[in-house]
Amino acid sequence: MKVFNKIIMTVMILMGFAIPSYAEKIVMEGSTTVLPIAQKAAEVYMQNNSSADISVRGGGSGVGIASLIDGTCDIADSSRPIKDTELDKAVTNGKSVKAHVIAMDGIAVVVNPANKVNALTKKQVKDIYTGKTSNWSQVGGDNQKIVIISRDTSSGTFEAFSTLVLDAQKVRPDAVMQASNQAIASTVARTPGGIGYVGLGFLSSSVKALEIDGVLPSKETVLNNKYPIGRPLFMYTNGAPQGLAKELIDFIKSPEGQKLVEEDGFVGLK
Amino acid sequence: MRKSLAVFVLIGFIGTCLGIRPSYAGEVDILLQKLVDKGVLSAGEAQEIKTETQEQVKQEISEGKYSSLPAWVQNTKLKGDLRLRFQNLHEKNDNNISKDTTVGRIRMRLGLESKINDKIKAGIGIATGSGDPRSTNISFGGYNTKKGIYLDYAYAKYDPLPWLNLVGGKMLLSDVLWEPTDLIWDTDITPEGAVIGFNKILDPKTSVFMKAGPLVLVDDTSTTSGAMAYLVQPGINYAFNDKLSLKGALSYGYFQVKGSAASSYSNGQNTKIGTSYANNYSDISPALELTIKEPFKPLGLNVENLKFFGEYVNNLAVSNKNTGYSLGFQLGNEKIEKWGDWQFKYIYAMLEKDAVLDILPDSDRYKGKTGMRSHEGALSYGLGKNTYLGFDVYRSWNIVGTSRKAPETLVQVDWNMKF
């Protein structure tokens, strides 16, 4: 009997070793615009919470929401509100999708400080970027060719600008494409006829932000929806978030998390 | 306290306004702005409350749509499609004499899947046809005769665990196996039997799957005229990154048909003794599909997907004329859902006469025969929501024997409607 007990004890001890240490794991998936926020927040959160395992991937808002509905991710990152068709699918799959606004995406249209144009309408910006307007004199400026500076098409800022201003029409083919907000600002700063667009966090005295439809871009005008080139950014969960998903969203909405949001050029809610 | 009360009242007000009359949204904005101006809320909090509440109301409205329907309707999904086809077949026989056959055809399929409980689903489908296991088409003609409707599938699915499922009955092919092309199995086949399926996500990049089960080919298994098939297919999905993924599987199928009378729908050139199959089919088949999302984005071209795929098959039960393969690519949208969506597919296929059982391959490729090689080019173009045009061209040749190649060209023009 003693031998039997020893065998049982040995097996139990070995099983104990075989059980891996507990680590809560969640998957975030979706919008490439929200991706930098999600990545940075996950990185900082995991540094402070070693038991947390947060996997972050892009793919686009639609992909993230589809994964949330299918149950293959815990948090769907989205740069747009959920569509009615997606909600219908969620409901038929027994899911109750909950939205969390984590930041605002506000984009400033900038020109060289020497440019005498101070304001444009959203339509004028669209006409400039799609090639319909090619000289500053057509919008109240000097007789000078407009040099279009744009973000590369894979960036979230480009996607936001394309959706909010261009109505998904193509940018003029001779546009100077840049890989970052800083590169746009510095190119506009040294190009007299240049026009570009940057996240609000990247405004500086080296460029001049234009009024759009009569409103200057600022944190306040983006948050109160008066500035027309802005939109909320979302994280969606299935029902009220629990465990690590809740802790992470709470962290992103906290002052510390919102500071990270603003470091990436987005507009924080705090 | 004052702030909490304000937020509570506001959420109720917004919900009521949005639920009853969306035009109140502007008034809600004014109210929120006043609370911001008075310092009760920050601009960020106002934005958060407004947007999250709007989203919550949308969710509740969506749930309300369903709560007024009977439970059985909420648990049942109905789907179907209708296809109108013009088809021309140009063929040359062994004496090099040409023949053209032009037909008009229709295909109608109607199916439903109902959730019996949280773990069990049942599906039933009917379709036009003539009983041919590889086709649900029916040709115009016969002086306006009424056309036949057949049971296309009837299955039960049991999901005891998130990664495990059991399917039994007359099943959809996608529940039985995965294939990148229809080299071995025509996609219209609905196999009969039972299949156990595993699907496990290992990490965000990797998932594995396996399907296995017995299938009934001829019902009487107590005599030599009965015939069974046994399938097993392990596979893997791997995402290298957001843009590049690979799906692969290795299938083994054992079709125990030696001595069994050949199917009346056999069009092929399998070796037979009299009217019975001379061999079993012990097919091992690796298959791969590489998907590249937005492959031409760096060039400024907006193409959703590019796929390369291929399959190989070897019948281990015989040693001669026992292999086949297909290679191809697909370019365009993943699905044709709206106006302007498009997809182009090309497949080259070759099947030797005893590579696979001759009642399985695509029925349009050289009339579904084995012992052939074929090029296929297919273009689909979206005409609007849930409707699209299809152009499919096959150019095929006989590869059995040393005599004529008996080439044929099949052209199909389809108008598809899904509902």
Image (tube, helix red, strand yellow):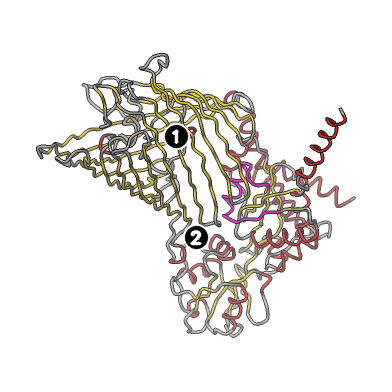
Task: State left or right for residue B51 relative to residue B223.
Answer: right
Numbered label tally: 2
Q: Chain of mark 2?
A: A
Q: Secondary structure at mark 1?
A: loop
* Quadrant where the image shows the C terminus of chain B: top left
Q: Amino acid at mark 1?
A: Phe
* Among the 4 quarters of the image, the one containing residue A114: bottom right
State the residue at coordinates (22%, 38%): B400
Residue on which disc 2 sits: A168
* Among the 4 quarters of the image, the one containing residue B189: top left
State the residue at coordinates (36%, 47%): B381
| Residue under disc 1 on the same chain as residue under disc 2 | no
Whether residue B296 is situated above or below residue B27 in the rendered picture: below
Q: Secondary structure at mark 2?
A: loop
Q: Position of residue A42 (x, y in %)?
A: 72, 58
Residue A193 vs residue A18, the one in the foreground: A18
| Magenta span contains residue B40 | no
Residue on which disc 1 sits: B419
Q: Amino acid at mark 2?
A: Ala
Q: Is residue A270 visible?
A: no
Task: State left or right for residue A59 relative to residue A28.
Answer: left
Magenta stretch, residue numbers: A54-74
| Magenta span contains residue A59 | yes
Task: State left or right for residue B298 relative to residue B76.
Answer: left
* Among the 4 quarters of the image, the one containing residue A15: top right
Q: Chain of mark 1?
A: B
